[in-house]
Image: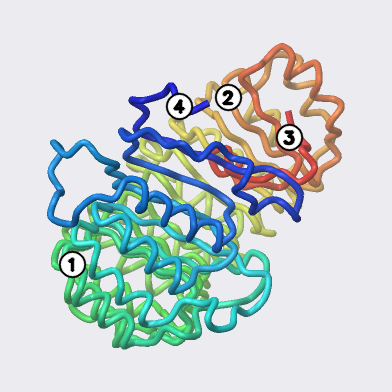
Amino acid sequence: MLKNLIYLEHLSIKIRGTEVDAYDLSNIDLFLPRALKSLKLQPLDEQDATHFIKKLRDEREIPMNLSNSSFGGFTLVRLSLVLDVITDRLMNSITSSLHLLVDLDLEDRPCFEPKLPLDLTNNGLQSLISCRHLTHLSIVRSRLNSPVSFKRVNDMGIFLLAESCKDLESIKLGGFSKVTDAGFSSLHHSSHKLNKLEIRNAPSLSDMAFHEITGVVELKLQSCPLVTSESISELASSSTLELLDTNGCRSIADHCIEYISCVSTLTSLNLGGADITDSGLDVLSRADLPLTHLSLRGCTRVNDRGIICLFNGELKIKKTLVSLDIGYMPGISDRAIRAIVSSCDAISELCMRYCFYVSDTSLRMLAKSDSKLRKLDIYHCVGLSDGIVEVMEGGGFRGLRWFGAGGTLVEKGGFGRVCERRPWLTVCFEGCEIGCHDGWQFHKYNDGY
């Protein structure tokens, strides 16, 4: 299939199948055009991926001293893989075969705790020194199938990475449970071009790692239990920060909002799971930040009053906000939705999953409003009836492109006629996040239109 696409530069393949053959690469045509610059594959078996990359090296080897565009060989610069496990063997295969890599994105999803030699260690990270052009690096161990982490990488491994890859502009690390503040802080101290930093599931990461952090445009600290509001105090004087994500950092409290309010450049804020209250949102409303994306998911101490206060008055957020997540907030009801509908003219994505007290009244308000709503998630809103089908058949939600309806009284069969009339509409019953991860979400039962 690919043999005739000689000018193809970007290729993404998602392998579908049963749990037995989901990682099998053998059934895929592995002919890759020499013009290919970007390759994304998921999911893959680590052994197959290693052999595949070695095959690229053996058949189309590029001398390390040839890095200009005039060279006619295989010049892959972006590689993204989702595997069963990331190992030193895989890292060595990549770094010894693909010297021109600019962007490397690796994620694994082990079903059990990896054991040597099938695991990543400090040696595997050190091999990245061969990728002299690397500017974007992402290495994540997902907890999707099991609560696992990279237990064989410590501060020394991160020190070696920081020293060998000083031109990194974007770093994403997830599941490095043995790395402490010393290791993580070396990343932003050594990489002077760093503007995007994301750290996930780091139980030893604390406020100390962010002393004198400067120049960052995007900062994501997800599920780091020792991170508190004091980490954000270091960012209060930032003139570059545009995105802040502390999702799952449950020690973030109202005090943090005072620091956030000082960052006038901030446009995207995720406070998911934070210990903030209605008072914190009151402070945020007075800051009048030009937020386009806001997530309060899991902020269980916030109720209708906080949402109403956030959108009260002549605020920038009422004109700029395009995405809002108020999922997993039991204190949210129709009153909050009314405030959102009447205030947020530009909102195109709304997630209110697990909002038990939201009723059909909210859906009717959303349907009647002259809104730009394109994606709506009502997963497990048990207070809703199947009246949404009737609303859509009557012409409501004409602009909707994606609708998450799982876990409600809404039945799949009722959407048949709606989707026939609206071929552009995707209805998901699997409980996916908004957009089904841009189509990369695997639907085990293919429940959706």
Q: Position of residue 447 (x, y in %)?
A: 78, 37
Q: Could you say whether the residue bearing mark 1 is in a helix, strand or loop?
A: loop
Which residue is label 3 attached to?
361
Disc 3 and disc 4 in contact, CB within 8 angstroms: no
Q: Which mark is residue 3?
A: 4
Going by the image, does 346 lie left or right of 266? right
Q: Could you say whether the residue bearing mark 4 is in a helix, strand or loop?
A: loop
Going by the image, does 271 lie left or right of 401? left
Disc 2 and disc 1 in contact, CB within 8 angstroms: no
Q: Could you say whether the residue bearing mark 2 is in a helix, strand or loop?
A: loop
Does 396 sit above or below residue 186? above
Q: Which mark is residue 128?
A: none
1 or 4: mark nearer the eye: 4
In the image, what residue occupies the spot 53% across and 21% down? 370
* Mark earlier in primary sequence (2, 3): 3
Q: Position of residue 383 (x, y in %)?
A: 81, 45
Q: Which mark is residue 369?
A: 2
Disc 2 and disc 3 in contact, CB within 8 angstroms: no
Classify mark 1: residues with Cα within 10 Å, few (<14), some (14-19) or many (20+). some
User: Which kind of residue does numbered mark 2 sit on?
Assistant: Ser
User: Which kind of residue does numbered mark 1 sit on?
Assistant: Ser
Which residue is label 1 attached to?
237
Classify mark 2: residues with Cα within 10 Å, few (<14), some (14-19) or many (20+). some
* Mark earlier in primary sequence (1, 4): 4
Report the Cα–Cα distance between label 3 and label 4: 55 Å
User: Which kind of residue does numbered mark 3 sit on?
Assistant: Thr
* Mark earlier in primary sequence (2, 1): 1
Classify mark 4: residues with Cα within 10 Å, few (<14), some (14-19) or many (20+). few
Q: Residue 154 sits in which quadrant?
A: bottom left
